[in-house]
Amino acid sequence: MPGVAETGTVTAVEFTEIVREHQAMVFSIAWHFLHDRAAAEELAQDVFLRLYRSLGELESPEHVTHWLRRVASNRCIDHCRRRRLTPRIGLDRIAEPSIPAVQPDPMLSRRLRQLVASLPEKWRALIVLKYQEDMENEEIARTLGMPVGTVKSQISRALDFLREKASRVMGGEV
Amino acid sequence: MSRIEDALRKALRREEPPEGFAERVMARIQSRDREAAGVREAIGPWGGLLAAFREPHLRWAAVCAAAALLVGGLEYRSQRLERAEGERASRQVMLALRITGSKLRLAQDHVRRIDYAPVERKERL
C-alpha cells in the first residue's frame, strides 16, 4: 500500500496489526459513549484513519495507546456536541420496572450501559476511561487535559448520580 | 470497591467491533490514498507543494513566514518613511540657515555702511 509505505514507519501489514491490537479498545470507548454500534464503528474507523496520518509523530506503542484513548474520547465528546446527542438515551426512555427486584447481571449491565450513555459527555468520558480502560485518575487527567482534582470529584459525582439512577431503575441498592 | 464500581467494570468490558473492522479501515485508507494520488495527478507539478501544506507543521511554518514577511515589510516601510521625513526636515533646516545667513550678511553690510557714513562726511568737511 503506497500510503503506508510513504509514512516510512510501518507497512500495510504492520498497520493492520496495530488496528487489530487496539480495535476493541477504540470501538468500546465509542460504543459505551454513543450507545450506537454503527456510529461507534464509523467513529472508531475515523480514529484509526487519523492514527495512520499521525503515525510519524508517535514514538512508542505506549504513546499509540495513549494517543488512541485521547483522540477517541475527544472525538466522542465532539460527536455528541456537534449532533446535540446529549443524551442519546434519555433517562425518561428507560422504563421503570413494574416489580422492583434484584435483576440478573446481564440486565444490570445493559441498564448501566444505558445509564452511562445518558450521562453528560465529560462524565461519560471519565466513567468509560475509569471503568472500561481501568485507568488511574492521573492518567485520565493527562488524557482529557483536566486537573486530577477535577477528575476525582467529577467521577465521584457521576458515581453518585449513577448509583441513584440505577437503584431507582433497577430497584434496591446498587 | 463499591458495588456500583464493580457493576460498571462488568458492564463496560471491552467488546470487539463487528467482523472485518480492520479490513474496512485499511480499505478506507487505500481509497483515500487513491483519491489523494488522483488529486496530485490532476493538479500537476504544484501537487507536491500543495500536498506539503496539508501537513499541520508546514502550514504553521508557512503562516509564521508570511507573518514575519508582513511585519518585516511594514517595519522597513515605516523606517523608510521616517528617514525621508528626517531628510526633508534636514533640508528645511539647511535652507532656513542659508536664508538666515544671507539676511545676516545684508544686515551686516547695512550696519557697516551706516558706520562709515559720518567718517566720510567728516573727511569731506
Image: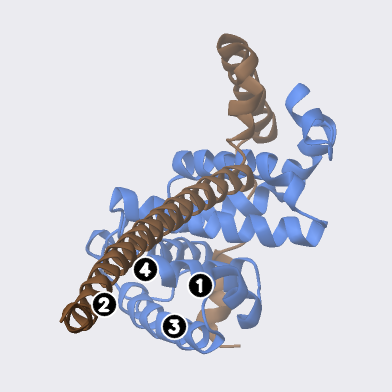
Chain colours: A blue, B brown
Q: Residue at x 26, y 77 (%)?
A: B112
Q: Quadrant of residue A148?
A: bottom right
Q: Residue furthest front?
A: B125
Q: Secondary structure at mark 3?
A: helix
Residue highlighted by disc 2: B112
Q: Nearer the viewer, mark 4 or mark 3?
A: 3
Mark-to-mark CA distance, 1 and 4: 10 Å
> What residue does disc 1 label?
A126
Relative image position of residue A130 (x, y in whole percent):
58, 74
Chain containing mark 2: B
Q: Which residue is mark 4?
A: A119
For the residues marked 4 and 3, what is the alpha-carbon distance in whole angstroms?
12 Å
- Decide if residue A174 is in sight here: no
Which subunit holds the residue at mark 4?
A
Same chain for mark 1 and mark 2? The answer is no
Q: Earlier in the sequence, mark 1 or mark 4?
A: 4
Q: Given this view, does label 4 or label 2 mark the residue nearer the observer?
A: 2
Q: Amino acid at mark 3?
A: Gln
